[in-house]
Image (tube, rainbow, N blue to C red):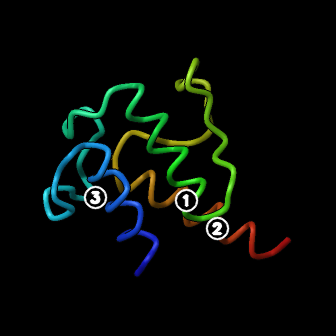
Amino acid sequence: MSIQDRVIAIIAEQAVLDPSDVTPDSTLEDLGIDSLGLVESIFAIEEAFDINVPFNANAPEESDFDISTVASIVAGIEKLVAEQGKS
């Protein structure tokens, strides 16, 4: 399963949607994910990939981690996973 597929599965689970309903262009708002759902998604992603996502739930706009779309979340996770592999 690719990183994108795993992230989409996690986000779909949080949104109580079928993964086929989650597209790379989807925003979390489109999917009905609120701030609590976002935090739960981030925790699930961190656990699934054994990474730390640099995200501050209290000030998401101050984070370097782009959560604007599913594709941007996937890109961020891919970067974190690649960086982790180098260390």
Residue 78 drawn at (x, y percent): 55, 66
Q: Are marks 3 and 1 in contact (CB under 8 Å)?
A: no
| Crowd class of label 3 (few under 14; some 14 to 19; many from 20; radius 10 Å) | few
Q: Say which quarter of the image contains residue 67.
A: top left
Give the residue type at disc 2: Val
At mark 1, the secondary structure is helix
Q: Residue at x 49, y 34 (%)?
A: 39
Residue found at the very far bottom of the displayed protein: 1
Q: Are marks 2 and 1 in contact (CB under 8 Å)?
A: yes
Residue 50 drawn at (x, y percent): 66, 62
| Crowd class of label 2 (few under 14; some 14 to 19; many from 20; radius 10 Å) | some
Mark 3 vs mark 1, CA separation in Å: 13 Å
N-terminal-most mark, 3 or 1: 3
Residue 46 drawn at (x, y percent): 59, 53
Q: Which of the pair 77/52 is nearer the observer?
A: 52
The reply, left or right, for residue 80 in relation to residue 14 is right
Mark 2 vs mark 1, CA separation in Å: 6 Å
79 to 13, vertically: above or below = below
Give the residue type at disc 1: Ile
Query: Which disc, if any, is residue 77?
Result: 1
N-terminal-most mark, 2 or 3: 3
| Crowd class of label 1 (few under 14; some 14 to 19; many from 20; radius 10 Å) | many
Query: Which disc, if any, is residue 81?
Result: 2
Residue 10 drawn at (x, y percent): 37, 56
